[in-house]
Amino acid sequence: MGDFVVALNRMLGDLSLAQVDRGVVQSLVGKGSEHLIRSILEYVKKRPPAHAGCAQEAINSGAGADLYAAAWRSYQRHYLAINGQHADVYPGVTDGLKLLESQGLRLACLTNKPIAFARPLLKSKGLDGFFLQVFGGDSFERKKPDPLPLLRTCEALQSLPARTLMIGDSSNDAAAARAAGCPVLLVTYGYNHGEPVRGVDADGFVDTLAEIDLARIEITTGPAPR
């Protein structure tokens, strides 16, 4: 989350727009960088003039498409420069991935983050070696919650959707899994667009990846379809 906040505020600074706090970013993250940037620009546009200052004038003076294009270029530059520097791996993630890997499970990372951001971030945190495949928000024609990325990931893993466990942290992930026909487990420490994650339709919840009960995910341990 820290990387998002820093990169977005540097982007807003480049555009002479008002800064946003962590809570705002946390409520909007999860549907890809393009959606995040558009949502942040819309949020700043709607802020009361007394607090927006030059932000409102800057937005009103530029065409929406031009403003977004400038914001996207700025965001990419700043995010790549600080990628991973303000992000921490949640407790239990590494142990949980080691546990899954030790059982011979084939793992893939599917994120709405652009692939140019996702791969360096995984590498910087020492997590890249766990995954046979890494797919980003621009790897396919559509993003989660559309089921297409998850279905393509299942194909890459040579695993049927019904035998592939989706581990996510939001309603976005759960919706993609339900539409793709995958069972879904959600961690409770994600963002979930500012809403309680336990209210999401999922097959189970864990507080850390290290708590995953492998006996309950035997659907993923059988041989791959031929």
Image (tube, rainbow, N blue to C red):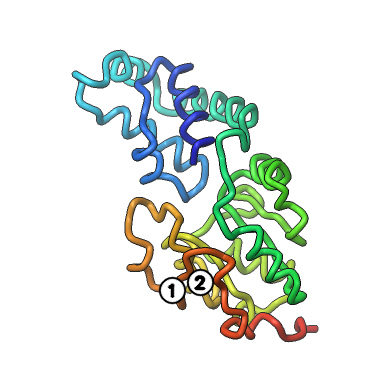
Please tell me which residue is depicted at 40% across the width and 39% down the height of the picture: 25
- For the C terminus, which image quadrant? bottom right
Count residues near mark 2 (Cα–Cα under 10 Å), then give few for <14, some for 14-19, many for 20+. many
- Position of residue 121 measured from the top left corner of the image (x, y, whole percent): 66, 42
Please tell me which residue is depicted at 34% across the width and 51% down the height of the picture: 194
The answer to the question of whether label 1 and label 2 lie on touching residues, with beta carbons closer than 8 A, is: yes
Front residue (pair 53, 129): 129
Measure the C-alpha gap from mark 1 to mark 2: 6 Å
Q: Which mark is residue 185?
A: 2
- Position of residue 181 measured from the top left corner of the image (x, y, whole percent): 54, 77
Assign a secondary structure to mark 2.
strand
Please tell me which residue is depicted at 25% across the width and 31% down the height of the picture: 46
Residue type pointed to by label 1: Ala
Asked if residue 28 lies left or right of residue 173, the reply is: left
Q: Which mark is residue 226?
A: none
Sequence-wise first label, 1 or 2: 2
- Position of residue 98 measured from the top left corner of the image (x, y, whole percent): 71, 65
* In this view, 53 is above or below 208: above
Residue 13 sits in quarter = top left
- Position of residue 156 measured from the top left corner of the image (x, y, whole percent): 74, 67
* In this view, 168 is above or below 3: below
Count residues near mark 1 (Cα–Cα under 10 Å), then give few for <14, some for 14-19, many for 20+. many
Asked if residue 47 lies left or right of residue 4, the reply is: left
Please tell me which residue is depicted at 32% across the width and 28% down the height of the picture: 44
Which residue is denoted by mark 1 in the rendering?
A: 202
Assign a secondary structure to mark 1.
loop
